[in-house]
């Protein structure tokens, strides 16, 4: 779906040349143009190895180096402690809780907002 998109903002997470996940960011429009939402996923069999953290650090650095953004942010389901730890290990800070902000699998749940700021 994203192959050939320019500029490049979506990437495969690869282990030994095999895609095992994905990571990307979306620069926001208009007054939010200096912010980008970042997201990632990783195949369960690759969890707990630091792979997602390494990918997040690399793509965060890429976004700040190649785009006129000063803020990257991510939303995490409040029950997803592993994803919150990935963000924290990559240097993101929790900015707050978005109460009852999404509905997943029939449950309306909270999300945590994480962000990294660079001047």
Image (cartoon, rainbow, N blue to C red):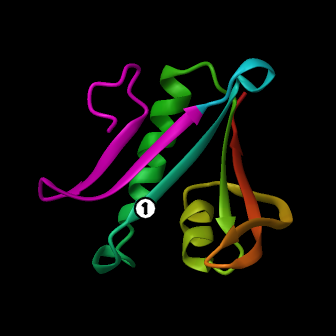
- Horizontal side of residue 3 vs 64, given as left or right: left
Residue 106, image x and y in percent? Answer: 67, 79
Query: For the point 62% across and 54% down, which residue is it?
Result: 91
The quarter of the picture where residue 49 lies is: bottom left
Residue furthest to the front? 106
At label 1, counting other C-alpha atoms closer than 10 Å, the crowd grade (few under 14, some 14-19, many 20 or more) is some
51 to 30, vertically: above or below: below
Which residue is nearer to you in this view: 119 or 4?
Answer: 4
Residue 95, image x and y in percent? Answer: 82, 56
Query: For the point 62% across and 69% down, which residue is it?
Result: 84
Residue range highlighted in magenta: 1-26
Placement of the C terminus among the 4 image quadrants: top right
54 to 105, vertically: above or below: above
- Horizontal side of residue 70 vs 19, given as left or right: right
Query: How many numbered marks appear?
Result: 1
Residue 50, image x and y in percent? Answer: 39, 68
The residue that label 1 is drawn on is 41
Residue 10 lies within the magenta run? yes
Placement of the N terminus among the 4 image quadrants: top left
- Horizontal side of residue 39 vs 78, given as left or right: left
- Horizontal side of residue 95 vs 119, given as left or right: right
The quarter of the picture where residue 102 lies is: bottom right
Query: For the point 34% across and 35% down, which residue is it?
Result: 2
Query: For the point 54% across and 21% down, which residue is it?
Result: 67
Give the structural element (helix, strand or loop) at label 1: strand
């Amino acid at each position: 779906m994203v192959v050939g998109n320019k500029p490049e903002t979506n990437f495969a997470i690869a282990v030994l040349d095999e895609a095992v996940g994905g990571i990307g960011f979306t620069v926001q429009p208009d007054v939010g143009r200096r912010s980008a939402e970042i997201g990632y996923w990783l195949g369960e069999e690759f969890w707990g190895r630091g792979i997602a953290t390494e990918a997040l650090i690399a793509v965060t650095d890429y976004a700040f180096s190649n785009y006129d953004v000063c803020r990257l942010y991510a939303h995490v389901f409040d029950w997803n402690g592993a994803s919150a730890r990935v963000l924290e290990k990559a240097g993101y800070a929790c900015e707050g809780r978005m109460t009852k902000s999404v509905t997943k699998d029939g449950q309306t749940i909270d999300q945590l907002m994480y962000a990294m700021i660079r001047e």
